[in-house]
Image: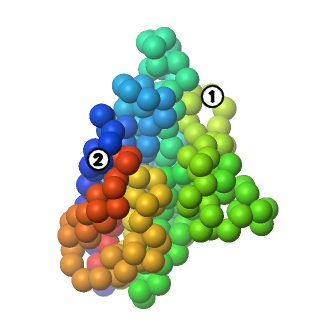
């Protein structure tokens, strides 16, 4: 029996930001989310350039090569317009490569989650200063949620040398996947995310519910979610 990838993408400005620096892609084999760094138009340019480039993997490209292309696109944009110098973006992706197989690509603090049999698993590690404090046992995950430097990113795509993480993933029919910018994960708990992913409804309804939770919590940042159900 074949498996179908059903995808929904939803992005919201949030309640405090004047512009949306997030970008996302939901294709037939690739899902991706990017959160721009640099403020104003620079963040938007970086995230959109990265998503446009990495989308090449949807047409049979290799994920590592797609990340390299995304990084080069940012470098080229900054070269063409000095006002964009120093801009960057997070980039988190899942490429479904074949029956039962996928690859997670990640850099920055956007996240990938999997909900299987009602259990939520985070598939990525935040590339942040605060996550390093958690790893060292200096603070716990709840303290990390409220740390004043929780948005200090240690890795991103900025057109320079970069180190992204690529992880093979075994998939199953019935799996539900979420990619999101930190506008969701910073203010909506993993418990609430898991409950929403595990509830009934289609990917579009799930995406709307998650964004609604962020808005109800104050949504100080842009909120972007990509939902993929393996049916």
| Viewer can see residue 214 | no
The image shows residue 190 at horizontal and vertical percentages of: 47, 72
Check the image and report above or below for 163 versus 19: below
Quadrant (top left/top right/bottom left/bottom right) for the C terminus: bottom left
Q: CA distance from mark 2 to mark 1?
A: 32 Å
The image shows residue 164 at horizontal and vertical percentages of: 62, 47
The residue that disc 1 covers is: 160
Tell me which numbered mark, 2 or 1, is placed earlier along the sequence: 2
Q: In the figure, residue 191 lies in which quadrant?
A: bottom left
Closer to the camera: disc 2 or disc 1?
Answer: 2
Element assignment for label 2: loop
| Viewer can see residue 136 | yes
Residue in the image at 49% along x and 34% along y = 37
Which residue is more in the foreground, 42 or 50?
42
Quadrant (top left/top right/bottom left/bottom right) for the N terminus: bottom left
Q: Count the numbered circles shown.
A: 2
**Could you tell whether 115 is left or right of 123 in the image?**
left
Q: In the figure, residue 156 lies in which quadrant?
A: top right
Residue in the image at 62% along x and 28% along y = 160
The image shows residue 146 at horizontal and vertical percentages of: 56, 58
The residue that disc 2 covers is: 15
Which residue is more in the foreground, 1 or 84?
84
């Amino acid at each position: 029996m074949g498996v179908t990838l059903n995808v929904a993408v939803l992005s919201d400005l949030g309640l405090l930001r004047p512009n949306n620096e997030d970008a996302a892609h939901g294709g037939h084999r690739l899902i991706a989310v990017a959160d721009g760094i640099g403020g104003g138009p620079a963040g938007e340019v970086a995230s959109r350039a990265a998503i446009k480039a990495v989308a090449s993997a949807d047409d049979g490209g290799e994920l590592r090569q797609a990340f390299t292309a995304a990084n080069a696109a940012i470098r080229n944009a900054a070269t063409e317009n000095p006002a964009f110098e120093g801009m960057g973006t997070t980039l988190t992706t899942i490429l479904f490569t074949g029956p039962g197989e996928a690859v997670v690509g990640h850099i920055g603090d956007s996240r990938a989650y999997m909900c299987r049999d009602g259990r939520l698993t985070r598939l990525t590690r935040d590339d942040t200063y605060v996550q390093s404090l958690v790893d060292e046992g200096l603070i716990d995950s709840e303290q990390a949620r409220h740390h004043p430097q929780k948005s200090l990113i240690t890795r991103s795509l900025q057109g320079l040398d970069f180190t992204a993480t690529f992880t093979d993933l075994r998939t199953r029919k019935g799996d539900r996947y979420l990619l999101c910018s930190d506008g969701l994960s910073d203010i909506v708990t993993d418990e609430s995310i898991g409950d929403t992913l595990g509830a009934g409804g289609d990917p579009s309804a799930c995406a709307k519910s998650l964004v609604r939770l962020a808005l109800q919590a104050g949504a100080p940042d842009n909120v972007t979610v990509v939902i993929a159900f393996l049916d």
